[in-house]
Image: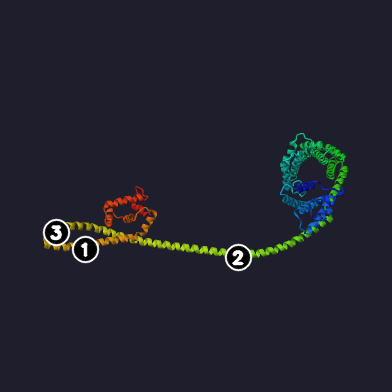
Amino acid sequence: MRYFILNIILFLSLSIAAKGKSNTITREDVKDDIIDTNIIDAKLYQRQGKAEESLKKGLEVLSSAIQLTPKDSFHIYSILASGFSAINVHETAFEHANKSAKILARISNNKAAAAAWMPKYCIAAKQYTLAIKYLKLDLENCSKTTNTHKLLRLYNDIGFIYYKNHQQDSSIHYYLKVIEYEPDSKRPIVGVTTGNLGMIYFDNADYKKAIKYLQIDVEISKGKVWESYCNAMNGIADCHYQLGNYSKANKVVVELLASNKQSDRSLIKSYKLLANIYQKTNQEAKSARYLRKYYALEEALRKKQAPKSDMAKQIADYKLKSIQLNLKLANNEVKLLDAQLTSEALQNKMYLFILIMIILAITMAIIYYNTRQRKNKAIHQLESDLLSAELKNKQSDLVNFSTNLSYKRKFINDLQDKLKQLQNSSQEDLDKNLTLLIRELNSYENSDKGVETIQADMDKVNSSFFNKLGEKFPALTQNEKELCGLFMLKLSSKDIATIRSVSVGAIKKARHRIRKKLPINESEEIITFLENL
């Protein structure tokens, strides 16, 4: 795989072979790891500089809808990118180059694999942001090596693309990286970068500083990089022209024309400059002559760079076949989508039905719960009211009973006095008085039954209260819980002692034990605490 990637990068980093180059290249020379024979033919045409034949063969491969391997797909898109670029169809060239780059990244598991050759396609298609991305990936790999020339070239290229993308601050930043990397360096790349920096100052109308940097480019590039030298000379002439130094501008352009090293693009700039200079100096005939040269050369370049009509037809045919194939696939996808939509619609109806049923069930449950809560609340309120009324009645009975107790105590005392008197009575008086005492004792017996009845009623009424006490304070005994019920009735210790048939002291001790078992403050009454439960 590594050998495959290196071959790809090496191959694509080379310039497109020009027409007239040797046609002795064979199929074996271009075969590499390509499987499809048609792709080998297309690549052979490409290497021989036959862009049209290469494109035709490549478009035939794509329009045939043959299933290609990933590697063959990479090669065919790369060949088409190169071919379209050669005939100046840059947008289409970029589309195919981008596809080949994605395939290469996938099969090589390396996002930077195409960084060496993708930027030129991006720049031609004005995809500057993507070009910078690829160049920075290449720069990241280059920074790990000692290849100074490549490093400086990448700095310059990134700066140039930022310039093309109207980001001058970023452009200057990368240009200065080149210039400051090796001060006073005579490397050709330093000259190119210095000239590019000069053109930024030219764009900003700082013509004197622009001349300074462009002159450095001229000195370094002359005899080494003629394209950069010619651009710098034209730039210097244009600076003098803008400053109104027409004679200096004319001298620089004439010197440049005498070098005979200019490309057509450079000549166009020179002709336009001379036409403008002669017009400013009122030499209309010379101005007209160079203006005609300018228009003639520009028209020739335009025709040369325009896509050829037959290739345009080939592209249209290829796109038509691609559209037909895409339509066929789209129809199949539509049918599949319709089936999926039908299934999804049915599923959605089922989901909606289930959702409605769930919502209905939840609503019914909430209604039932709320109704049950209201009923329970009403029942509890009614029970509470009944219990309160019953407690009041029983409390009234206990109060009455307590009142009767005082009379009973007096009666018992009187009975004791009478018994003492009987000791000294005659037999006749004794029988008579005993009969009376028996009647009085029967009355006392009925009073005791009343006490038992009241105790039973109190236990019945306070059953829920006793349960609550047992849950919250399990340490309380049954006897202590019953005493708490009597405390709730606000009876005195003496009355409780009478009801329980114990001494008042026993009731007071029991009250003390209960206070220890309950979380009661020293200042709080037991009755108050129990009522708050």
Q: Quadrant of the C terminus?
A: bottom left
Look at the image and tell me whether residue 525 can be seen. no
- Residue 395 in the image: x percent, y percent? 31, 59
Sooner in the amino-acid sequence: mark 2 or mark 1: 2
- Residue 374 in the image: x percent, y percent? 44, 62
Dot 3 corresponds to which residue?
422
Distance from the alpha carbon under mark 3 to that under mark 1: 19 Å
Look at the image and tell me whether residue 338 can be seen. yes
- Mark 3 residue type: Leu
Crowding around mark 2 (Cα neighbors within 10 Å: few <14, some 14 to 19, many 20+) is few
Crowding around mark 3 (Cα neighbors within 10 Å: few <14, some 14 to 19, many 20+) is some
Crowding around mark 1 (Cα neighbors within 10 Å: few <14, some 14 to 19, many 20+) is few
Q: Name the mark on residue 442.
A: 1
Q: Name the mark on residue 16.
A: none
Determine the secondary structure under disc 1: helix
User: Looking at the image, which residue sits at the far top?
Assistant: 184
Determine the secondary structure under disc 2: helix
Along the line of sight, the residue nearer the viewer: 434 or 395:
434
Distance from the alpha carbon under mark 2 to that under mark 1: 87 Å
Dot 2 corresponds to which residue?
349
Sooner in the amino-acid sequence: mark 3 or mark 2: 2
Cβ–Cβ under 8 Å for marks 3 and 1: no
- Residue 181 in the image: x percent, y percent? 74, 36
Give the mark toward the camera: 3 or 2.
3
- Mark 1 residue type: Asn
Distance from the alpha carbon under mark 3 to that under mark 2: 104 Å
Seen in the picture, residue 93 relative to 271 is either above or below; the reply is below
Determine the secondary structure under disc 3: helix
- Mark 2 residue type: Lys
